[in-house]
Amino acid sequence: MDTNTIDWGKLGFGYMKADYNVRCYYRDGKWGEIEVSSEETINIHMASTCLHYGQEAFEGMKAFRGKDGKIRVFRMDENAKRLQHTSDGIMMAKLPIEKFAEAVRKVIKLNERFVPPYESGCSLYIRPLLIGISPRIGVGPSTEYLFLIFVQPVGPYFKDGFKATPVVILRQYDRAAPLGTGTYKVGGNYAASLVPGDLGHKMGYSAVLYLDAKEKKYVDECGPANFFGIKDNTYVTPKSTSILPSITNMSLQQIAEDMGMTVERRQIPEEELATFEEAGECGTAAVVSPISMVKDQDLDKEYVYCKDGKPGPVCTALYNKLRAIQYGDEPDTHNWVTIID
Ligand code: PLP
Ligand code: COI
């Protein structure tokens, strides 16, 4: 692949092959050395626990090329910790934080030419994956695991880029149970979101906004991103036992505080959606994606934040500040960025 032929302005979130991926196996109770591969396929046993019992976890993070040409990875230690949290949650071997960091550095260096130029506004998406690979037919955890990371350049996750889009509440679907796997980044949560996600897209919405599964009363999160609302100089985001602890959200809470805003992490009853001045989704892929309207399909209610798709001032400020830190345009005062050299 000649990276000079990539039209950065048209780049979305589709799969693209880079040169190399890195792999590391857990066998006999220990992690091996990091191996480099240029194969896109993996050879695993057909009875692997990842295939049958969902013993599978992934992560998502990004690397950015700055004006100075340097490559910066955003908060990779947090992704390493979250993978450990997920591993505990579904009984997988835990990858040491240092091994995770070594693998990330290595895969970026090997694929340096795929890190998009600064001016493109694109980034290198980094996808770590951890799967149980022992054959087992009775339900139970593997004894052997494969950790791998592949990377690829990406543009915006939502095809409109930084533009406010509508989201929908579909009350007949849940993403995750209150005490289930919602806080873990496991494939099953995304499988559960496919049917509602498809329905939402067909209805013209960019994403589904899930309510808490137990009471259907509180806002949980979107399919691929956390939710936040803005009012009275306050950043409000859900506290829930069934949402993914988003690293972007954690960062935006700090940025909001740095901007002099109050931050509240608490339950958000659906009716409160009517009181927000702005609302948005946030995540590695979604970055900050402003919400133009939340539609509750079954109650036939609409909570409107903007009519013309133009992001509000607070969403814009949060987006700009986050991106400026990620691309190295503004000082990294919280030590969020790792320079890959
Ligand atoms: N919520 C879900 C369900 C996600 O898949 C993601 C994406 O990773 C997020 C939230 C955002 O998390 P982060 O900001 O760590 O990417
Ligand atoms: C991410 O933001 O990295 C995600 O994992 C979201 C999505 C692509 C599943």
Image (cartoon, rainbow, N blue to C red):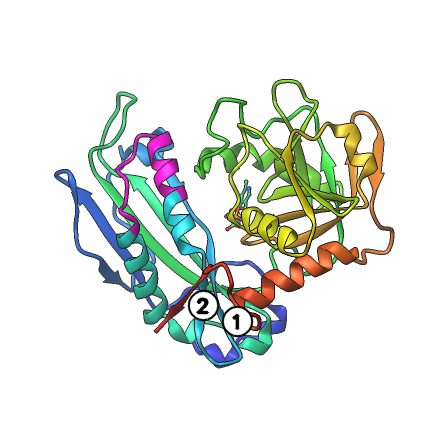
Residue 297 visible in the snapshot: no
Residue type beneath disc 1: Gly
Amino acid type, residue under disc 2 in the picture: Arg
Residue at 34%, 36% in the rendered image:
87
Q: Quadrant of residue 303?
A: top right
Q: Pinpoint residue 225: horizontal percent, then vertical percent.
A: 59, 44
SS at mark 1?
loop
Q: Are marks 2 and 1 in contact (CB under 8 Å)?
A: yes
Badge 1 density bin: few <14, some 14–19, many ≥20, Cα 10 Å: many
Give the residue pinned by disc 1: 328
Tell which residue pokes out farthest to the left in this image. 28
Magenta-highlighted residues = 82-97
- Residue linked to disc 2: 72
User: Is the residue 1 above or below the residue 48 in the image?
Assistant: below
Disc 2 residue crowd, few under 14, some 14–19, many 20+, Cα 10 Å: many
- Residue at 47%, 80% in the rendered image: 69
Name the residue nearer the viewer: 23 or 272.
272
Can I make out residue 330 in this image?
yes
Location of residue 177 in the rendering, given as x and y in whole percent from the top left corner: 53, 23
